[in-house]
Image: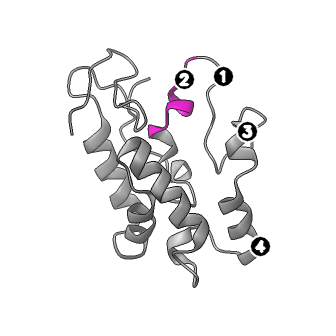
Amino acid sequence: MKMPEKIDNMMFAPCGMNCKLCIKHISKSNPCPGCLIDSPNKTKNALKCKIKKCLETKRVKYCGRCSEFPCKLMKKQDKNYKKRYNYSTLDNAKRITYTGINRIMLEDKLNWECPSCGGIISIQERVCSDCGLNKED
């Protein structure tokens, strides 16, 4: 999958994950459309996400804009993502308040677009979805 010129803001999940960079979205078979997209093709995790349900009850779009941020749910998720993928959803969620979503999406495009072919490098595997190039940290 090629990286688009501009990543749609709907790809920014409430928790701070950029769904465009998720291995489940990049998947060639039955790709997840993203956390904010209404679709039956969402992954089980996206459908039962406690963070998204929490924000719906609080009427807040992003965790970083919640008065209880960072909460226990966010800290747990962030710890998991840091350990498994060396990626902080908590940092992204914080950044939305002072950087803005458009800037985050632009930076993600620059950081996660394959320099070799223009494909998308997944956060989880750190491999280009098109040419297989490994991203070095």
| Amino acid type, callout 4 | Thr
Residue at far top of view: 131
Circle nearer the N terminus (2, 3):
2
- Residue 46 in the figure: left or right of residue 90: right
Q: Residues within 10 Å of mark 2 (few under 14, many from 20)?
A: few
Upstream in the sequence, badge 4 or badge 2?
A: 2
Residue beneath disc 4: 57
Q: Residues within 10 Å of mark 3 (few under 14, many from 20)?
A: few
Residue at mark 3 to residue at mark 4: CA–CA distance: 20 Å
Mark toward the start of the polypeptide (3 vs 4): 3
Q: Are marks 2 and 1 in contact (CB under 8 Å)?
A: yes
Q: Nearer the viewer, residue 89 or 2?
A: 89
Nearest to viewer (mark 2 / mark 3): 3
Q: CA distance from mark 3 to mark 1?
A: 12 Å
Element type where label 3 sits in the image: helix
What residue is rendered at 63% in x and 48% in y?
Answer: 35
Mark 1 highlights which residue? 30
SS for dot 4: helix
The residue under label 3 is 44
Instruction: Name the residue at 40% across, 35% down.
Output: 4
**Left or right relative to 34: residue 80:** left
Residue 25 horizontal/vertical position (percent): 55, 32
Identify the magenta region. 21-28
> Pointer 2: what residue?
27
Residue 131 located within the stretch drawn in magenta: no
Q: Quadrant of residue 95?
A: bottom left
Given the image, on which type of amino acid does mark 3 rest? Lys
How far apart are the two marked residues, 2 and 3, measured between alpha carbons?
Answer: 15 Å
26 to the left or right of 55: left
Instruction: Characterize the magenta stretch by its predominant secondary structure.
Output: helix
